[in-house]
Image (cartoon, grey):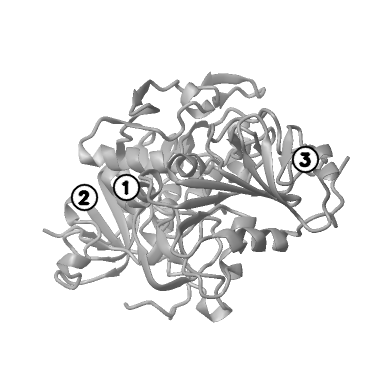
Amino acid sequence: MDKIRTDVLEMLSIVPDGASLAVGGFGLTGAPIMLCDALCELDKRDLHIVANNAGIDPTGVGRLAQEGRLRKFTGSFPSNKNFFSLFHEGRVELELVPQGTLAERMRAAGAGIPAFYTPTGAGTDLATGNYPARYDSDGNVVQWLEPKDVRVFNGRPCVLETALACDFALVKAHRADRLGNLAFRLGSRNFNVPAAMAGAVTFVEAQNIVEVGAIEPDAVHLPGVFVQHVIQSTGGWVGNPNPPGASW
Amino acid sequence: MSVDERIGWSRDGLAQRAADDVPDGAYVNLGIGIPMMIPSRLPEGREVWFHTENGILGLGGVPEPDQIDLDVQNAGKEYATMVEGASTFDSSLSFAIVRGGHLDIAVLGGMQVTPSGDLANWTAPGRTPGVGGAMDLVTGAKQVWVVLDHTDRAGKAKLMRRCTLPLTGARCVTRIYSTLGVFEPAGAHFDCLELAPGVDEQTVRGLTDAEVVFAGGGR
């Protein structure tokens, strides 16, 4: 079994226009920037991106948004100004989701759980559907969020949330082996694990590709069964190359 | 009427006042803004564990330039540090910590808060919506503290009878640290537990859009 690939454009060419993609990262920490860049190079369009942030710079998901490649964004913090303009111009749909619900919906997709109840958001506009999902080009709301079913557990209202299965996932790992076993570094694990679980096919850009066995069994954060394709990241690591506390 | 900037606590003083009340041994999540100023103002000898929703328990203060590490940031995407004994995990586990009731306190910013403990802090007209983890935090944390200016930039009250902005959560706030004092939602009114230095009851009454009951019994 060898999941290592060498040509990022060839690897990602199987992603069709219109695909849904779960993308790891929180801000730029753990964001698979090289993979997002490759989707731009391949001129992929009409994408549904599921990620926490819509990018904080024209980088990663932010670049995909800026180049108008999104038909829909599902996430908790689309604070990117460019994305917000696109949303209000009616050029992209927004499904705004509380962050913990987002992570759990992604995890559930990979865990075989079609839906679950959570108290988060109950009674708010995000649960009652009183928040815009799409505008027209004149800035009128033409679609609202779907109202969520409510059920009371232990006296507490909870909302029904569905799994967020995606066609693909884009993930950034610190270490990967040819079997797709992954290890992340410090705070970069974040949405990479739920994203890999949500994607039917998961692409990984790895900072370091290591021999099988180099990641101790107890140190594998995501087993290779969730991963289909691994490629060496050329994005570099933007942080301090020798931070205190980095054990490897 | 708008708040004179010299009235009450400064941002720094407000962060310090909230930090003074964080108990030893607490697990605490900090929202973006003034709450993030709390760790560096904790009184000496107090061991507090700061959780950040992007997957770190044991967040420290601001790094020195040579300590900056892209993989260690707080929820505001600012560079941070970790203390010895810190742990890291994915977003799903991070929100199991939040939603599962394992945090003692969430300290959040706020746009509007009511005497019944309703909080609005995730969106306002013309603002990019940033719900982030706020709805999960107000649902799961044992206590929810709100740290805020007593009025908005236009001088309008933020402590008000009813939120006019979309709610983050209903009946969730347990404590309010405003630039004018320390308050608790008490159902139909706010209890004022303490006034900031130089602030009188009349000023608070004039800048609060709800009844305030003062610790000394004044109304």
Residue, disc 3: B218
SS for callout 3: loop
Q: Quadrant of the C terminus of chain B?
A: top right
Residue, disc 2: A226
Where is residue B76 shown, x and y percent of the image?
56, 56
Residue, disc 1: A194
In the rendered image, the residue lying farthest to the top is A142
Where is residue A182 shown, x and y percent of the image?
25, 61
SS for callout 1: helix
Q: Is residue A64 visible?
A: no
Image quadrant of residue A216?
bottom left
Report how far apart the C-alphas of labels 3 and 1 lie in the structure: 53 Å
Where is residue A21 shown, x and y percent of the image?
36, 41
Question: Residue drawn at (29%, 61%), measured in percent from left and top?
Answer: A231
Q: Quadrant of the N terminus of chain B?
A: top right
> Disc 3 residue type?
Gly
Left or right: B85, with B207 as reference point: left
> Disc 2 residue type?
Phe
Q: Residues within 10 Å of mark 1 (few under 14, many from 20)?
A: many
SS for callout 2: helix
